[in-house]
């Protein structure tokens, strides 16, 4: 008697004979399948921080590492790879195996500002897979308390009256404080004298001693001096006011629309990291940053939690590259 299932069975066997070698071919070619994310991570994950312990980059890195260790059930270990203004650590991220087991906490400036700033940079923005924006740290324009200007308009008027006479300090050539000062000079149409220092502390010291007129400083580093009345806050360099200085208007509010000079920190992976692993990491980071206790901890340090998709992070990197490349070119700034 004819078996009605015989034809179906033969068809299934033929399909399996085709699909089995095809699946082997896909796996051997490194095509990321759904199982990649399900089995991730398969071992300890290194989280490279390109700066020394205790700074904002390191702080954000350790919060991420602790949370991911709990979420994934595998150790995420912070490794501080310091040197060359962050370049050594960031380059190590770029050159790591793109399997999701090496990640990095990368200051966005290292991939947006550095390419037009350094002629011999060993990496480029395309060497990274953006994962998630983690944090934004605002800076504030401060002057010595003896300076007569009490607003941005008054400060720009002083600068316009004596071109090149007013000076601004920074932690070094090419630093965020330096570029912020140059951007303000360009957009405010004034001439300012840049005075670079080897670090933030000596710059603040000379500002307190009235050796320089002004500087852009991260809020947490200058807030005690503002509260003590030794420095005066002129304007916040983010697009919205800071919770630490709610009474201080932004620079954008005071006549330079869209002015923004902030430090951003992002979770990045080497280019080529499987998309589903990047998506998984982004989801975990987003859920962490939404926690009220994380928001409170960040707020006390003047840090705004990040968020958004990998695509939005990539767009931010691109827009910052365009902005700062223009400032660097117009002021002929180079770091060798």
Image (cartoon, rainbow, N blue to C red):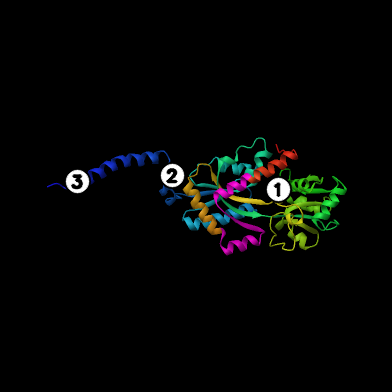
What's the distance in space between the residues labelled 3 and 1, CA to CA? 73 Å
Q: Quadrant of the C terminus?
A: top right
Residue designated by label 3: 6
- Marking on residue 176: 1
Label 2 close to label 1 by CB (< 8 Å) = no
Viewer-proximal residue, 269 or 276?
A: 276
Residue 253: quadrant of the picture = bottom right
Q: Is residue 117 left or right of residue 70?
A: right
Mark 2 falls on what kind of element?
loop
Residue 323: quadrant of the picture = top right
Residue at 74% from the left image edge and 46% from the top image edge: 183
Residue 231: x and y in percent read 80, 58
Residue 88: x and y in percent read 61, 42
Earlier along the polypeptide chain: callout 3 or callout 1?
Answer: 3
Is 62 rendered above or below residue 173?
A: below
Q: What is the tally of numbered marks visible in this picture?
A: 3
> Which label sits in the foreground, 3 or 2?
3
Residue at 53% from the left image edge and 51% from the top image edge: 77
Magenta residue span: 289-318
Residue 300 forms part of the magenta stretch: yes
Q: Is residue 54 visible?
A: no
Residue designated by label 2: 32
Q: Residues within 10 Å of mark 2 (few under 14, many from 20)?
A: some
> Which label sits in the foreground, 2 or 1?
2
Label 3 close to label 2 by CB (< 8 Å) = no
Label 3 close to label 1 by CB (< 8 Å) = no
Q: Is residue 254 visible?
A: yes
Is 17 rendered above or below residue 211?
A: above
């Amino acid at each position: 008697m004819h078996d009605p299932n015989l034809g179906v069975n033969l068809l299934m066997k033929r399909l399996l004979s085709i699909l089995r070698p095809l699946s082997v071919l896909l796996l051997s070619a490194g095509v990321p399948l759904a199982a990649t994310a399900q089995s991730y991570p398969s071992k300890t994950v290194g989280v490279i921080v390109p700066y020394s312990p205790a700074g904002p980059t390191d702080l954000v890195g350790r919060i991420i590492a602790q949370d991911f260790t709990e979420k994934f059930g595998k150790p995420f270990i912070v490794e501080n790879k310091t040197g060359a203004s962050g370049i050594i650590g960031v380059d190590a991220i770029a050159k790591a195996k793109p399997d999701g087991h090496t990640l990095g906490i990368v200051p966005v400036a290292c991939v947006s500002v550095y390419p037009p700033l350094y002629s011999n940079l060993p990496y480029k923005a395309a060497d990274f897979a953006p994962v998630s924006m983690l944090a934004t740290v605002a800076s504030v324009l401060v002057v010595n308390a003896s300076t007569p200007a009490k607003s941005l308009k008054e400060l720009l008027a002083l600068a316009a009256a004596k071109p090149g006479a007013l000076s601004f300090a920074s932690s070094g050539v090419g630093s965020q404080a330096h570029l912020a000062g140059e951007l303000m000079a360009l957009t405010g149409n004034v001439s300012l004298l840049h005075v670079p220092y080897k670090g933030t502390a000596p710059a603040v010291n000379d500002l307190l001693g009235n050796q320089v007129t002004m500087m852009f400083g991260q809020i947490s580093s200058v807030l005690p001096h503002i509260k003590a009345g030794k420095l005066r806050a002129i304007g916040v360099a983010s697009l919205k006011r800071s919770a630490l200085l709610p009474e201080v208007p932004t620079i954008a509010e005071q006549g330079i629309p869209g002015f923004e000079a902030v430090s951003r920190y992002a979770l990045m992976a080497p280019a080529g990291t499987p998309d589903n692993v990047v998506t998984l990491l982004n989801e975990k980071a987003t859920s962490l940053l939404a926690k009220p206790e994380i928001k409170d901890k960040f707020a006390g340090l003047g840090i705004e939690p990040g968020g958004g998709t990998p695509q939005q992070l990539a767009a931010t990197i691109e827009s910052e590259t365009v902005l700062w490349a223009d400032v660097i070119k117009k002021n002929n700034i180079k770091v060798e």
